[in-house]
Image (cartoon, rainbow, N blue to C red):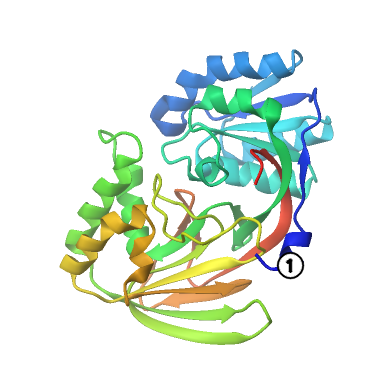
Amino acid sequence: MSESSESSVSSVPAESPRIIALVANPSAGGGRAARVLPSVQEALRELDPTLTVELTRGIEHAEDLARAAVEAGRVVAALGGDGLIGRVAGAVADADGLLAPLPGGRGNDFCRGLGMSLEAAAAARSLASAVERRIDIAECGGIPYLGIASLGFDSDVQVIANKARWVRGSQVYTYAALRALLAWRPATFTVEIYGPADETSTRQITGWAVAAANNRYYGGGMALAPDASVEDGLLDVVLTSRTSKLRFLSSLPKVFSGKHIEDPSVEVLRARSISVDADRPFQVYADGDPIADLPATIRVRAGALRVLAPPR
């Protein structure tokens, strides 16, 4: 991290006690959030006996609940998948509130990237010793996200993963990748990259995917962008060019360790924003949800969100 970006990031001790509003999506993670909700409530009430609990009816409702909680002076504890937490984070950031993310989905990659426990009640208890950090939010077409936005092969994977019902947990993404591989044909992507020093460049690749990473992880622990940081004010742009299906398949396990970026077919660049298009239609997915159609512009909002998390 550069000296300038380091100085723009703060980690301050959490004040205690805090008043907390829990915003929960009980259907997240195939019902996982509903199963852990009682233990999460119990843990949070130890921190705040006045805890309020609101169950979401959809994304817009979750955003409204978050804004209302900030206006009431409460920390917003968001229990759900990465998609819900990302949208709640956007509402909290716009209202200059404080977010306490809690893992309640299948992947939980945002909490993983922050170094939090992936057991929801344990994560809730850890808020007692958490610190306040300022982190980046990314946006695609005005929709906020916290993890990785991607398109191409990843779009096909997400469609399959979101329809899967009998595969549980993060293994759904491995299953979906294998299914998508069978029907995949290469696409051509054009990417305009606006770099850290206002320089611009254009990349045109034929191959697999384009991704703009705010966080290291997606897909339940895949380190697609192993050097990405939510505190550097930049996106890690991962471009995956054409290789044989057999070679691509053999490299999939390397994504969990981040060693896939050593392959010549993978290029990683840093940017403040990108504009991307392709030679056939794709939806851009982020945090497990479709958020935009092509062409799309993706940018980072440096230091836009205050979050309670373990120390950096």
On the question of residue 55 being in view, the answer is: no
Residue 306, given in percent of the width and then of the height, sits at: 74, 45
Task: Assess disc 1: are there few (<14), some (14-19) or many (≥20) residues with their C-alpha within 10 Å of its C-alpha.
Answer: few
Q: Residue at x 76, y 15 (%)?
A: 50
Q: Camera-side residue: 45 or 225?
A: 225
Q: Camera-side residue: 56 or 259?
A: 259
Residue carrying label 1? 3
Q: Residue at x 54, y 14 (%)?
A: 38
Q: Camera-side residue: 302 or 291?
A: 302
The quadrant of the picture occupied by the N terminus is bottom right
Picture quadrant where residue 172 is located: top left
Q: Secondary structure at mark 1?
A: helix
Three-letter amino acid code at the position of disc 1: Glu
Give the vertical position of 102 relative to 238 (above or below). Answer: above
Residue 199, given in percent of the width and then of the height, sits at: 64, 85
Q: Residue at x 54, y 30 (%)?
A: 25
Q: Residue at x 53, y 45 (%)?
A: 110
